[in-house]
Image: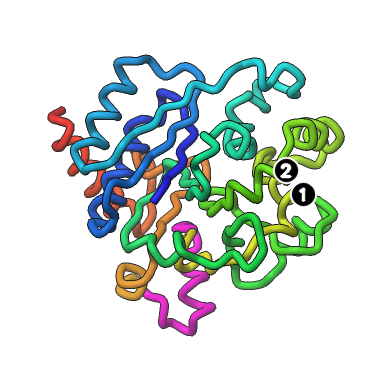
Amino acid sequence: MNLLLTLDENYLLPCKVMLDSFFASNPQEKDPAVYLLHSAIPGRKLAELEAFCAGFGAKLHPIAVEAVLFENAPTSKRYPKEMYYRLLSPLILPRQVERVLYLDPDMLIINPLRPLWVQNLRGNVFAAAAHTGLTEMANEINQRRLDTEHEYFNSGVMLIDLNAARSLVTAEDVFRCVSEHEKELILPDQDVFNMLYGKQTLPVEDVLWNYDVRNYSKYLIRSSGSHDLNWVMDNTAVLHFCGKNKPWHADYHNPFGMLYLHYQNLTVRRLGR
């Protein structure tokens, strides 16, 4: 299995917590590869992450993204070049890597990812989940905002057929989309993904593969009460701590916050801090 991460130095601890949870929940995965796209993580920090992964039998492949790729990119404080990394990952990752699973660092992996990894994309290039609410209103608003007809996909978990994506994704298309639609973009890289590649994306269930922990009550109501905490722990693979407030913040309040802190404490102990 090939995992893809894109982050800066500030997210290294959450990244390790996420990876720790992945290794604990996926012991059957032998020799997983972890590809990390970054621009300025110090070598010492990369060595620490490499040793952390090696302790679980995983190989870290850090890739310092060349600045020349972004010479024509619209960049600003709102549009840092790092936001383009996952969109352009098919152009950056080694050619021999044929499939990759992108994961945001603000997640816990609590069940096996193998069923998603082997998902038949049915001719699509990507697989991703749209976050469901009590109604389809949010999807409809995003469809109008971005002038799309498909569901609005969350890009925090993306399965990518890299061979197909290399024939589809271009830096020019991505940069042009940002320039031409700057006023419509709220979550820039996610919006661009939906505008350019939503039609080539296979929908997967968010309750299994990209569970927005803020929406626990909505998932419970939509399932007529069946998707309770016990169901989630038994069935959901990815808990996604979406939003600006994160479970490592002191003022975080959510039913899944204590679970995150448990995993974080295990990781910190493993690191010997």
Question: How many marks on residues?
Answer: 2
Q: Amino acid at mark 1?
A: Met
Is residue 49 one of those drawn in magenta? no
* Foreground pick, 122 / 67: 122
* Foreground pick, 122 / 260: 122
Is residue 221 one of those drawn in magenta? yes
Is residue 157 toward the left or the right of residue 70 in the image? left
Q: Pointer 1 and pointer 2: residues touching (CB < 8 Å)?
A: yes
* Foreground pick, 34 / 45: 34
Residue to which mark 2 is pinned: 192
Q: Residue at x 71, y 45 (%)?
A: 167
- For the record, the magenta segment spans 212-228
Is residue 244 toward the left or the right of residue 228 in the image? right
Q: Amino acid at mark 2?
A: Val
Task: Residue 183 in the image: state x and y as whole percent.
Answer: 82, 36
- Rendering quarter of residue 89: top right
Q: Outermost residue, front direction?
A: 96
Q: In this rendering, is residue 146 above or below 264?
A: below
Task: Residue 221 in the image: state x and y as whole percent.
Answer: 50, 78
Classify mark 2: residues with Cα within 10 Å, few (<14), some (14-19) or many (20+). Answer: many
Q: In this rendering, is residue 101 above or below 249?
A: below
Is residue 128 toward the left or the right of residue 144 in the image? left
Q: Residue at x 46, y 64 (%)?
A: 118
Measured Cα–Cα span from mark 1 to mark 2: 5 Å
Classify mark 1: residues with Cα within 10 Å, few (<14), some (14-19) or many (20+). Answer: many
Badge 1 element: helix
Colour scheme in use: rainbow
Q: Quadrant of the C terminus?
A: top left
Residue to which mark 1 is pinned: 195
Task: Residue 45 in the image: state x and y as whole percent.
Answer: 32, 20
